[in-house]
Image (cartoon, rainbow, N blue to C red):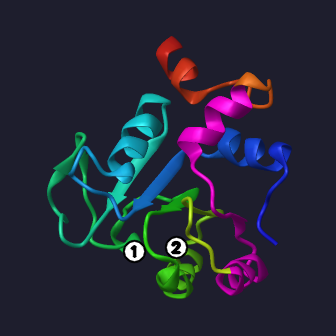
């Protein structure tokens, strides 16, 4: 079952450093654009993924055509795609060795989540890190926001 406890979700956010944002958009009105901006502002290393934008810059980050093209290890894959794509996405997440699959609000496929979990991938489903991080920080569950840590360096 996907993670639902605040402490579990806070743990994911605290230990995540690299995020592949699948379904990145260059349209500032799109939720994926705003979430990418938020994650970058909070110190995460975000790798946007969108085959239609591959090779271009998005918020000063190179856009990749697929998860396998990202040249670094990925801690979390944040999915802005429709739920019927999740089963295929899970295969890619497993192939690149990502630790967490995070699906955005309304993106739910319990069978895909179970496949990911059987492969050792933690799953957070139907949530948004741009909502969860501030909420969990306010609750004192995420104590070291990455943005503050990097601002001190």
| Residue pictured at 44% horizontal, 35% vertical | 38
What secondary structure is marked by label 2? helix
Label 1 CA crowd tier, 10 Å (few <14, some 14–19, many 20+): some
Mark pair 2, 1: CA separation: 6 Å
What secondary structure is marked by label 1? helix
Residue assigned mark 2: 96
| Frontmost residue, 29 versus 33 | 29
| Residue pictured at 58% horizontal, 56% vertical | 75
Residue 68 marker: 1
Residue 150 marker: none
Question: Is 58 situated above or below 39?
Answer: below
- Of the numbered discs 2 and 1, the one sitting upstream in the chain is 1
Stretch of the chain drawn in magenta: 110-137
| Dominant secondary structure (helix, strand or loop) of the stretch shown in magenta | helix
Residue 22: x and y in percent read 40, 64
Tally the numbered discs. Answer: 2
Residue 24: x and y in percent read 32, 58
Q: Quadrant of residue 113?
A: bottom right
Residue 34: x and y in percent read 37, 42
Mark 2 touches mark 1? (CB < 8 Å): yes
Which residue is the extreme one toward the top? 152
Examine the structure image and report whether residue 43 is included in the region drawn in magenta. no
Left or right: 49 in relation to 84: left
């Amino acid at each position: 079952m996907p993670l639902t406890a605040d402490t579990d979700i806070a743990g994911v956010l605290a230990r995540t450093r690299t995020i592949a944002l699948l379904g990145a958009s260059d349209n500032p009105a799109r939720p994926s654009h705003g979430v990418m901006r938020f994650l970058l502002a909070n110190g995460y290393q975000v790798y946007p993924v969108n085959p239609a934008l591959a090779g271009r810059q998005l918020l000063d980050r190179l856009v990749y055509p697929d998860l396998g093209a990202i040249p670094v290890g990925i801690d979390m894959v944040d999915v802005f795609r429709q739920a019927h794509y999740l089963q295929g996405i899970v295969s890619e997440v497993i192939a690149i060795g990502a630790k967490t699959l995070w699906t955005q609000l309304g993106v739910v496929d319990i069978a895909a989540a179970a496949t990911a979990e059987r492969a050792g991938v933690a799953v957070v489903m139907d949530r948004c890190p741009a909502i969860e991080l501030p909420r969990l920080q306010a609750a004192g569950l995420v104590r070291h926001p990455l943005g503050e840590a990097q601002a001190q360096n």
